[in-house]
Image (spheres, grey):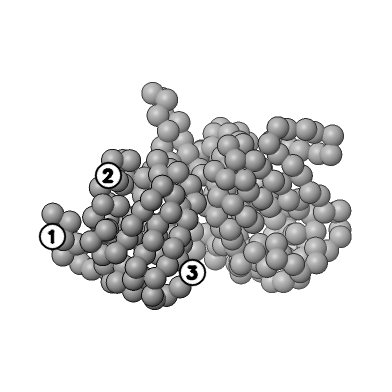
Amino acid sequence: MHLNAATAVPGVSLVSISKGQAMRPNNDWYIAKESILLASVPDALIDTILSQTEIRSFDRGATIFLQGEPAESVYIVLEGWVKLFRISQNGAEAVVGVFTKGQSFGEAAAFRNDVYPVAAEAVTDCRTMPVRAGMILGMMKTHPELCTAMLASTFRHLHALVAQVEQLKAHTGAQRVAEFLLDLCHVADGSCAVTLPYDKVLIAGRLGMKPESLSRSFARLKEIGVNVSQNHAAISDVALLRAYVEEDRAVAWSRAQ
């Protein structure tokens, strides 16, 4: 989906940066710099890349791109949450991933000049920074260090995927839910109250669970001081919850019985 100043799409707004105008280091600049896509790119090249980007805002529920659409950009999330999902032949939705501030997605398809194998939708109101893959591929011809940076981003994505598979294989459902809650905590110990960033059906899909399994996991976590009410979770002891996540799977299973 290509937007310009004359294009009006419901639920989408656009902030452009004039071509050739360096983007001043601000909060968005630092978020983009720390993303998997740009983390290994030299600052001078980041300035060049970001001077030719635009920031797109999406309302909750807005489509960012469709499954099968030509993959022209890699997206960096600046604020909010985005889900990637596939629609099967029988119409069922399978959640592939959920991304938030500082995370990027779409690299594999965009750099191969392929189509997006998934659809992307704003789970909450969000702001994104789409980086055109063609621009980066063109810069690689004169800046070989950019090739190394893109390889590094690929390895980081692979490492994250391996960690996700390990979580699914090595942790019980309750442990996966506990780890999800820990990622939302802003403290390392003591008590903490967090707000669930999106609905429980999506949380279940993100964690590879059915909604009813998620409800059972929330109930089991009450034993270690986690109380969930609507979209809020109160954690009495963050360190205790972390210890539960790090328990051996067999011990966690016996606790869950």
Q: Residue at position x 74%, y 42% from top?
A: 13
Mark 3 is on which residue type?
A: His
For marks 1 and 2, the one nearer the N-term is 2
Residue in front for this viewpoint, 104 or 256: 256
Give the label on residue 3, or none. none
68, above or below 233, in the image:
above
Image quadrant occupied by the C terminus: bottom left
Say how many tags the image has. Answer: 3
Q: Position of residue 100 (x, y in %)?
A: 55, 55
SS state under label 3: loop
- Considering every residue shown, the one lying at the far top of the view is 90
Measured Cα–Cα span from mark 2 to mark 3:
26 Å
Using a 10 Å C-alpha cutoff, classify the residue at mark 3 as few (fewer than 14 neighbours), some (14 to 19) or many (20 or more): few
Image quadrant occupied by the N terminus: top right
Q: Residue at position x 73%, y 37% from top?
A: 2
> Mark 1 near mark 3, Cβ–Cβ under 8 Å?
no
Using a 10 Å C-alpha cutoff, classify the residue at mark 1 as few (fewer than 14 neighbours), some (14 to 19) or many (20 or more): few
Measured Cα–Cα span from mark 1 to mark 2:
17 Å
Using a 10 Å C-alpha cutoff, classify the residue at mark 2 as few (fewer than 14 neighbours), some (14 to 19) or many (20 or more): some
Q: Position of residue 48 (x, y in %)?
A: 78, 62
Q: Position of residue 173 (x, y in %)?
A: 27, 52
Mark 1 is on which residue type?
A: Ser
Measured Cα–Cα span from mark 1 to mark 3:
30 Å
Q: Which residue is mark 1?
A: 254
Q: Which residue is mark 3?
A: 186
Res 140 quadrant in image: bottom right
Mark 2 is on which residue type?
A: Ser
SS state under label 1: helix
For marks 1 and 3, the one nearer the N-term is 3
Q: Residue at position x 47%, y 56% from top?
A: 195
Q: Which residue is mark 2?
A: 213
